Image (tube, rainbow, N blue to C red):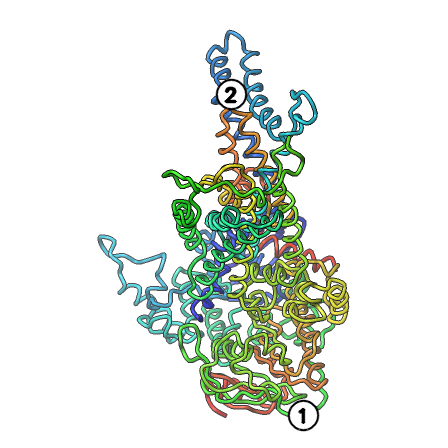
Amino acid sequence: MKLELRNITKRFGTLVANDNISLTLEPGEIHSLLGENGAGKSTLMNVLYGLLQPDAGEILIDDKPVKFSGPGDAMASGIGMVHQHFMLIPVFTVAENVVLGNEPTSKLGRLDLGAARKLVKEISDRFGFDIDPDALIRDLPVGSQQRVEIIKALARDAKALVLDEPTAVLTPQETDELMEIMRGLAKSGTSIIFITHKLREVQQVADRITVIRQGKVVASPSPKASASELASLMVGRDVDLEAKHKPAKIGKASLVIKDLTVLDDRNHQMVNGVSFEVHDGEVLAIAGVQGNGQTELAEAILGIRKVHSGSILVSGNDVTKSTVRQVLESGLGYIPEDRKKDGLVSEFTIAENLMLDGSFTPPFAKGIQIDFAKRNEIAKDLIQRFDIRTQSAETLAKQLSGGNQQKVVVARELGRELKVLVASQPTRGVDVGSVEFIHEQMIAARDSGKAVLIISTELDEVLALADRIAVMYRGKIVGIVDAKTSREKLGKMMAGIAA
Amino acid sequence: MSKKVKALPAADSQANSVLREIMAGDPVRIGLSILLGFIIGGIFMIVFSEDVVDSWSNFGADPNYAFSAVWWSIQDGYGALFYGSIYNFNADDFISGIRPLTETLRFAAPLIMAGLGVALTFRVGLFNIGATGQIMVGLAGATFVSTRLELPQILHMLVAVLAAVLAAAVWGIIVGILKARFGAHEVIVTIMMNYVATALFTFFLREPAFLLEANGGGTPKSDKPADTARLGALLGESFNLHYGLIIAALSVVAYWWLMERSTFGFRFRMVGHNPTAAKAAGIKVENTFIWALAISAGFSGLAAANQGLSISGGLTTSIEAGIGFDAITVALLGGSRAGGVVLAGLLFGAFKAGASSMQVAGVSPEVLGVVKALIVLFIAAPPIIRAIYRLPKPGPKMIEAMQKAEKVSK
């Protein structure tokens, strides 16, 4: 099936999210759609999937114009979408999930699970997915769940697949396997639109690349283009992908974690006897696939999650049982993995967000009153120092781009006296330009003698920042290794194979 | 302790985001809701006006009269509301002309005070409907001091006001503790506490040991408040307006300072907008709930003092006069802001003051009840107002658009 988007324009109010975008997907082609957050990729895909109606332009399938008024129409025309967040029911089997909404029935409308199983088996065998139709979704690893999503689309005769950031949740090995699967699908004639911001993957698998910036197609570089060429096209200026390191000047251990065990809300042991030290002047990065206990570890350090056993010391003081406020006041800065949930109040102004954890003490508080003059002065200074792009300190946080929001969080935490910085996913959902800036700030914090703990699921980020790397798997530290360790070895560790 | 902490991340569920939109109170939407309420109220007046019905059943006889009857029915109704609540142009002199406005202020004062209380909890993200109960308990406190204690002028009044505030605050703290320590939902708890408080107040009024009037019969009624404790007339004896208005004005300033200037208010608002971020910023969300409910109830206590210390006779439970319930509407209508609550309180005060003159003009004052209810209905269902006036929907799309606009502009 040949799929063509022709001159698609989509406006939201005065903003043009898609400006005259044209895109052709040939049969059996892997077409990579590259762009920063907010470049207009999702809008374009929502238009393609019938979730949004374009203001101008048309969609053609095999050169015939089609109109989609909803995802049902798109699916019927052979377009399948694999979302970033899986749409699966954990307590159902693979077969049940695959046929959900499109159930094969025998006489009298009885559900024909046998047919469903056969369908899954057939597709799984054809593409080497290695999926058991009777397995429960919740028992499958994330990579397999993703394959179930792909089977779901194929079971509905999808000829064109849209994969939206499919590798975000995968280990490097799983990512490689997915790449294999994509190639296999393409060989059998299925076309794939591959949305991502990871340059390496684009280079690995794409037959064709389209770069979108600010709603426009800016380039269609050759798949052989270098990573820095692609990055520059995405951002619109030259980008330095490697943060510059001076050699670490290692001091005393300011963050000491000993035999830490933490439970999640359902009392599952998420962090299981973890020990490590972060020294002044170094960056220790915790690598690992999402959901291996990193979130709980970070929350336990800050004190918003109870420690089950073990201890946490911040510059010599035991803060295992301290309140969040005591931990913060002991000199720990915290950048949460989900800034919208834990790091910002979107309805607050930038100035208010910059004093979020400072309302108890000077300079922000004068007795029980807010010191507005000081507050505004500090806000002005931080906005400038941390390059927060805004017209005023009174702009609401929700009006800022992801990168600028993150800079507000980083500015707040680094803006006060710190000994230890704990940063979880410090550049998630942040544009490439801001990634560069935030990485520089982390390195600057390290160079000024702070102990920096970075928790990241992006191996690129870990490798760019770390002096030492601890790999976490199923709540345990698999090993702590040197920053020069190879990707392959780290990948294996992320899958739980000890170094 | 840990159980309700887990409930917090759910704060972004859809129901809560609608609730938050309702409580945030966008001024444009509120203005349009009021307008629509008045328009539909007007339709009620037209449809139930005898003149209109008569003239339209004989439409052929005099079409002009039929149309003017429609106009007159509205003019009579809302005109009477104006005469009864702002200025009476038919009065003999200025003093009696301006009297309706002072009545509006008198009715508005307790609505504003209780409205501020409810507004405060809205901004902490709590849907508090306990003002009624807090007023009942506050009335018990104020009445006990004003009828059973003997103190010098002014001091007596101040002690009575303080008693009302403290009694109400205790009532609020109970809700706060139940929520913070045991995870009880404040809506259910406050409703139930309203019943308990009303029954408790009635019990006090029946008990000679507490509040029952000295030479009382069987009806639950208190003595009249001692003169030393009464809120005196503000503009002389020709008006009913009393010092309650001054207390209300001070409350407004206090509320504004607390919410917009103080670090407490900053933390209240933070918890209201994003409790998980507040937690990560070192704020004890549960304790914040307790404080907010206590202070909120304190404002309701002021409304109780206003009621209990201003009447010339003995008290019965009817002195509450629906203020606790109207306070919710006032807070919603005022967008939980100090200024907004004042305006909303004045509007509802005007409704109360104007009701009697509407009745005199032959228009059923129940129409005002309909208008009030409709305003709340429209505010509580933002999609209706958006659909009627074709307003854009605030949501991810719009935020996304704004973010991009921001990016483009830099």
* Residue A32: % across, % down: 58, 67
Could you tell me how far apart the alpha carbons at marks 1 and 2 are, in whole angstroms?
Answer: 88 Å
Residue B223's place in the image compared with B38, above or below, is below
Which label number is shown at residue A11? none
Toward the top, the furthest residue is: B61
Please name the amino acid that badge 1 sits on.
Ile
Rendered position, A8 above or below A266: above
Pointer 1 and pointer 2 on the same chain:
no
Q: Secondary structure at mark 2?
A: loop
Nearest to viewer (mark 1 / mark 2): 2
Residue labelled with disc 2: B362
Above/below status of A482 relative to A453: below
Q: Are marks 1 and 2 in contact (CB under 8 Å)?
A: no
Q: Quadrant of the N terminus of chain B?
A: bottom left
Q: Residues within 10 Å of mark 1 (few under 14, many from 20)?
A: some
Q: Residue at x 47, y 49 (%)?
A: B140
| Quarter where residue A345 is shown | bottom right
Question: Does residue A64 appear anywhere in the picture?
Answer: yes
Chain at numbered mark 1: A
**Residue A24 drawn at (x, y percent):** 58, 59
Q: Which numbered tag is attached to residue A250?
A: 1
Q: Residues within 10 Å of mark 2 (few under 14, many from 20)?
A: some
**Residue for point 65% across, 20% down:** B90
Is residue A431 in sight in this rendering?
no
In-image side of A428 versus A118 (left or right)? right
Q: Nearer the viewer, residue A107 or B318?
A: B318
Q: Chain of mark 2?
A: B
